[in-house]
Amino acid sequence: MNEDAWEYSIDIPHNPLAVGVARGALRLILRAHGPVELLPAAELVASELVTNAHAHAPGPACLRVKRTGPWLRLSVWDSSGEPPRVGLCGVDGEGGRGLRIVEELADRWGHYAFGAPGPGGKLVWCELGGGQ
Ligand SMILES: Nc1ncnc2c1ncn2[C@@H]1O[C@H](COP(=O)(O)OP(=O)(O)OP(=O)(O)O)[C@@H](O)[C@H]1O
Ligand SMILES: [Mg+2]
């Protein structure tokens, strides 16, 4: 396999194992291929994106982990057509922090919907690694 370009897709169950499955897979993948320096940030943003898929969308999700040149791209598909919305989060607010964390740690992020025909739902993606 070309170490500069590889890709994995991981099925994420819609149950309390969701985040553990995502983090465990990410650890295995980055320890096998590198770059391990990105692992802490990658685990954190993957946790937030998978938690959002679990909390705000019904059914299973899919995490894709892709390396292209310097970039590590993490994408999470879920079945909801509702877009993620970066909100205002007060000091005492109970939510609205997840996407802030993604914004802070990722070099760039975004989302797009899948219209019919097709799987429907949407993909939320982010990229890390540009600074290396
Ligand atoms: N995968 C998703 N599907 C649908 N809506 C989403 C999704 N991800 C985020 N959102 C919307 O964007 C909002 C902000 O997401 P964010 O992760 O920042 O905060 P949160 O999930 O509400 O709280 P937390 O601080 O626990 O992450 C959510 O409240 C939700 O309305
Ligand atoms: Mg969240």
Image: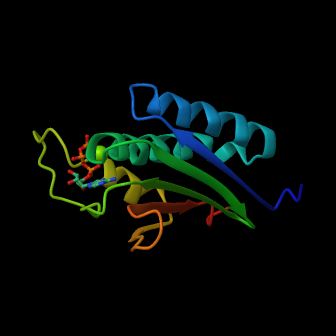
Residue nearer the viewer, 62 or 110? 62
Badge count: 0
Residue nearer the viewer, 24 or 132? 24
Which of the 4 image quarters holds residue 30? top right
Residue 69 drawn above or below residue 46: below
Residue nearer the viewer, 60 or 1? 60
Apparent side of residue 116 relative to residue 73 in the rendered image (left or right) = left
Q: Position of residue 42 (x, y in %)?
A: 55, 46
Q: What colouring does the structure picture have?
A: rainbow
Apparent side of residue 28 relative to residue 47 in the rendered image (left or right) = right
For the N terminus, the quadrant is bottom right
Q: Residue at x 33, y 46 (%)?
A: 52
Furthest toward the front, the residue is: 117
Residue nearer the viewer, 89 or 48? 48
Residue 65 drawn above or below residue 108: above
Apparent side of residue 117 relative to residue 42 in the rendered image (left or right) = left
For the C terminus, the quadrant is bottom right
Q: Position of residue 101 (x, y in %)?
A: 36, 50
Furthest toward the top, the residue is: 16
Q: Residue at x 63, y 52 (%)?
A: 65
Q: Residue at x 47, y 34 (%)?
A: 13
Residue 7 drawn above or below residue 32: below
Q: Position of residue 16 (x, y in %)?
A: 39, 25
Q: Residue at x 40, y 35 (%)?
A: 14
Which of the 4 image quarters holds residue 22? top right
